[in-house]
Image (cartoon, rainbow, N blue to C red):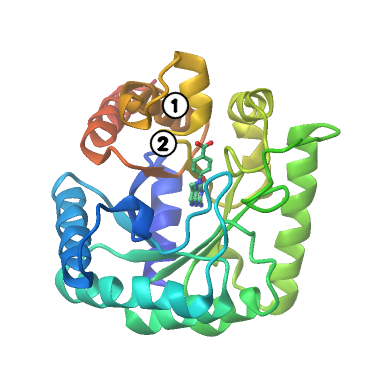
């Protein structure tokens, strides 16, 4: 088993989540500036998240938020490889690569990434095979549709049941391709082809996904569902809502929390861990 897969299993057994800090290296995430300027900015942000207690850093070179347009594998590699090389040389926290593309998975792991985070659920041709060949843990997220159009008219028969069916199929595909069961992490994909009601039902019923027997990764940080609930239009103003949502997810069995606000979430999880130690 990959050492990171073991750490994820240990965290799941202790019921204290790992914190994954988000590092976007998409041009829209940064103010203008040259390539080196961007690299410096990314490295400084990653260092800060590690200082604040992040257990993992998730590096992404393609925006997958609602409405985002796809980019080529070459463009994605150009963005993420220098960052992953620099970070993996300097930091001792593992790096995951947020990508749907097998070529980017391979390039990122060659550069030092130790986990795959695929919002497309390892459904691209060759994606599971890349995860198997690379020998790293992989997260398969659920998404209905594709980022550009997924929020048009999301529909489910029963959102939790539909996702459970999707995950059973992905677990079977992963097993058939030879992915070790301990290497597969699942994620319901908050905001990916889901209405506010779908998202809330999934959070309320998160425990049900544990019956699948895989660790759960949860990404809700600063998402529009929190903006709708709180009336906060600016994503930067959703920190308190994000911490609340992260803790609710952790209480319902979320094992890896993918967040922007690392320091705040680490404090919240410390409170959760203390109450757990006291028997709650
Ligand atoms: C996620 C996730 C991700 N989210 C995983 N990877 C994003 N495993 C990128 C909004 O409604 O949840 N899990 N990688 C970012 N995607 C979104 C989606 C950002 C929706 C914002 C929204 O605001």
Residue 250 shown left or right of residue 122 in the figure? left
When the figure is inspected, residue 32 is found, relative to residue 89, above or below; the finding is above
Residue 221 tag number: 2
Viewer-side residue, 94 vs 68: 68
Q: Callout 2: 10 Å neighbours few (<14), some, many (20+)?
A: many
Pair 2/1: label in front:
2
Q: Which residue is mark 1?
A: 245
Q: Residue furthest front?
A: 32
Residue 180 tag number: none
Q: Residue furthest right?
A: 157
| Residue plotted at (58% across, 28% down) | 203
Asked whether the viewer can see residue 135, the reply is no
| Residue plotted at (48% across, 55% down) | 63
Q: Secondary structure at mark 2?
A: loop
Asked whether the viewer can see residue 232, the reply is yes
Q: Secondary structure at mark 1?
A: helix
| Residue plotted at (57% across, 44% down) | 66
Residue 215 shown left or right of residue 95 in the figure? right
């Amino acid at each position: 088993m990959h050492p990171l897969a073991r750490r994820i299993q240990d965290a799941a057994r202790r019921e204290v989540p790992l914190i994954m800090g988000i590092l976007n290296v998409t041009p829209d995430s940064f103010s203008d500036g040259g390539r080196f300027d961007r690299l410096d900015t990314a490295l400084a942000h990653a260092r800060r998240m590690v200082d604040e207690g992040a257990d993992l850093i998730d590096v992404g070179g393609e925006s997958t938020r609602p409405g985002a347009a796809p980019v080529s594998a070459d463009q994605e590699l150009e963005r993420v490889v220098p960052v992953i090389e620099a970070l993996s040389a300097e930091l001792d926290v593992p790096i995951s690569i947020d990508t749907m593309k097998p070529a980017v998975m391979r390039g990122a792991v060659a550069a030092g990434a130790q986990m795959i985070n695929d919002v497309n659920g390892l459904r691209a041709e060759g994606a599971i095979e890349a995860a198997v060949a690379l020998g790293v843990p992989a997260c398969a997220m659920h998404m209905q549709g594709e980022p550009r159009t997924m929020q048009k008219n999301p529909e489910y028969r029963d959102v939790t049941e539909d996702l459970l069916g999707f995950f059973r199929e992905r677990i079977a595909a992963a097993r058939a391709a030879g992915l070790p069961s301990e290497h597969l992490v699942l994620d319901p994909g908050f905001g990916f082809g889901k209405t506010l009601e779908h998202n809330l039902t999934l959070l309320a019923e998160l425990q049900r996904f544990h019956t699948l027997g895989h660790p759960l990764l949860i990404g809700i940080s600063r998402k529009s569902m929190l903006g709708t609930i709180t009336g906060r239009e600016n994503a930067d103003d959703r920190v308190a809502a994000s911490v609340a949502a992260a803790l609710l997810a952790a209480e319902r069995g979320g094992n890896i929390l993918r967040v922007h606000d690392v320091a705040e979430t680490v404090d919240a999880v410390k409170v959760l861990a203390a109450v757990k130690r006291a028997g709650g």
